[in-house]
Image (cartoon, helix red, strand yellow):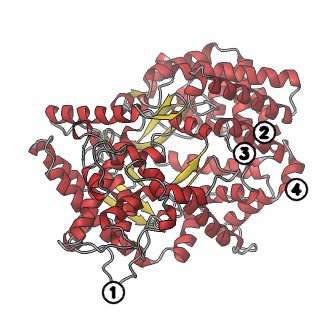
Amino acid sequence: MRKVNNIIMLAAVVAAGSFSACNTKPALKGIDTANLDTTVSPKADFYDYACGGWMKANPLKPEYSRYGTFDALGENNREQVRELVLGLNRDAAKGTNEQKIADLYDMAMDSVRLNNDGIAPAVADLVTISETPREGIVNLMATMPGIDVFFGTGVDADLKNSSMNTMYWGQGGLGLGDRDYYTDDSERSQNIRKAYITYLRTIAGLAGYSNEEAARIADNTLALETSLAQKQLTRTEQRQTEKLYNPFSVAELVSKYPALKLDNYFKAQNLDVDTVIVESPAYYEFVANTLGKTDEQVLRDYMISSYLSSAAPYLSDDFNDARFELRKVMTGVEEQQPRWKRALSVPNSILGEALGELYVAKYFPESSKERMETLVANLQIALGQHIENLTWMSDTTKAKALEKLNAFNVKIGYPDKWRDYSALEIDPELSYWNNIQRSILFNQDFNNSQYGKPVDRERWFMSPQTVNAYYNPTTNEICFPAGILQAPFFDPELDDACNYGAIGVVIGHEMTHGFDDQGRMYDKDGNLTNWWTSSDEEAFNELAEKLAAQFDSIIVAGDTHANGHLTLGENIADQGGLRVALTAYLNSLNGAEGEVIDGFTPEQRFYLAYANVWAGNIREDEILSRTINDPHSLGRWRVNATLRNLEPFFNAFDIQEGDAMYRPEAERVIIW
């Protein structure tokens, strides 16, 4: 079903039918009324009305900084995967996926061995780092798993020739993850930097460095990372895709910036790279100068901190505890996850498709995939109707948009071919960390092996058990793993209005990403090219700026505002998903009246189901962290702010001027 012509044919056949149509009609089940807080009026605060009951019934556990319906489904999936892992044969033949999964999990669970080993698994690498001269640093960065400094490289589709893979060079090397933690002078950011210094000193001390050495390592690291952060692009600037596409020949970069030795970097990885797409030339120049002029000891200290921080989760408990203390300050979480959850996340990531194959065999019936195919087809036709009816877009651009829509590649449940893990060797005789290093190199080699080759459009970028979905602009594909195709997002026993309001909106959301502020810049083949008329582009940007301003005005905590430009793509997709999914649902009725269930009309159930997708509790520190680094708006605003633009929502709940949820028509923004 992944060929484009098949998808279009399927759409033509089933679009008029109901999603729930099948041989056996499921029992009609509506919204779970326990999720509601009826002491709140939907006209005053729809999020609290729709989700208040769920929020009260699911208070934050100490191990969570945020807990919502996504997390609840993730917990359920984690339990399912744990059952699969515990059931594996511990005598499985060496080299089998079963052996690799079981051994990785068991090594993580062996706290006695981990604590006895302490820093021992990392000592040889630390000695190597301490003895590396300036001219050897770039080679070390290329070959030693665990060193994540200065920048990152990786193979991906060429944005302007999407059928072929090329090499990218991007900014990186910040232990705190985001530049704003280093450049912001708020009290909170200062406290995070203090906690980071404490963390770096602690893990250096645990690694055997003296107090004086540990203080030097930490101080040098923060100073160097701060200088890097000041030259890096903000997350909002990184959304300006066209500006990130800067191809250079490797020979040109080596000639202009010899200190970086990029040719040696790739040779050390057994790669013959002729061209690199540099995402930030100004940052590249700064890194080259830094590598050439910074004191060697400072460079080594920086690498030591990075290496130890990478290794910490896979060493003894005291390293894990130190890492958690930093996370507490950054997110407000109170308690570390139990060991089995941390242990499970490793094979679930490294051997994701191997576990996914077991997962779908047990938990994902073929009937769910068939129903999703029907639903996706219905949404695809509905989005086409929206495009055709736009008043701000010309017929010329509409034709191109419809071509792109009809060219969507749809992936549902699981891949048709599973990834080959035979080259990855997991040896329980080695330490846990050393096996993780092998896994890092395995994935690095796999990614590098794609350089210069045609893009594999059958490849998945999420494992089947993942509770999420994605749109990939360079392959023009939407992907819905089996993990998200469960209640409350997808439930065969729910009526159509609820399913369209939940998983239907998720589908519409991913489709709309093809036409958000970033996705719209790619054509039907996934190439970064402008297929818009100048007047249509101007009209789109005007609407997008108004939507960004709506979210900029939201106060998320204290005096901190949301970032409407960072979250613009997701906000456009949320609105598009809601509008398109409702149209698809109404189409499925074929003019008939939807049934009232538990006193709620179909339209009311649709919007309540959508809100329930984003039900959750969150700590203030996590709110502030996500406002810095998350391109998604907070759940409350994905509901309240988005719905306040939609006339059908006002009609469903009789929201009138004067109600808090009302937005005057002149201030509303409708894009897709």
| Circles 1 and 3 in contact, beta carbons < 8 Å | no
Tell me the kind of residue under disc 3.
Glu
Nearer the N terminus, badge 4 or badge 2?
4
Q: Which residue is mark 2?
A: 322
Residue at 30%, 54% in the rendered image: 649
Q: CA distance from mark 4 to mark 2?
A: 18 Å
Q: CA distance from mark 2 to mark 3?
A: 14 Å
N-terminal-most mark, 4 or 1? 1
Foreground of the two, 150 or 181:
181
Amino acid marked by disc 4: Val
Numbered disc in front, either 1 or 3: 3
**Which of the two discs, 4 and 3, labels the residue nearer the N terminus?**
4
Left/right placement of residue 631 relative to residue 340 reads left
Which residue is labeled 4 in the image?
Answer: 112
**Which residue type does callout 2 highlight?**
Ala
Which label is found at residue 334? 3
The residue wearing badge 1 is: 23
Nearer the camera: disc 4 or disc 2: 2
Q: Residues within 10 Å of mark 3 (few under 14, many from 20)?
A: some
Mark 1 vs 2, N-terminal side: 1
Q: Position of residue 485 (x, y in %)?
A: 45, 67
Tell me the distance, in whole angstroms, between the alpha carbons under discs 1 and 2: 56 Å
Marks 4 and 3, how far apart in space? 25 Å
Residue 604 vs residue 246, the one in the foreground: 604
| Earlier sequence position, callout 2 versus callout 3 | 2
- Judged by depth in the image, the label closer to the viewer, 4 or 1, is 1
Mark 4 vs 2: CB contact within 8 A:
no
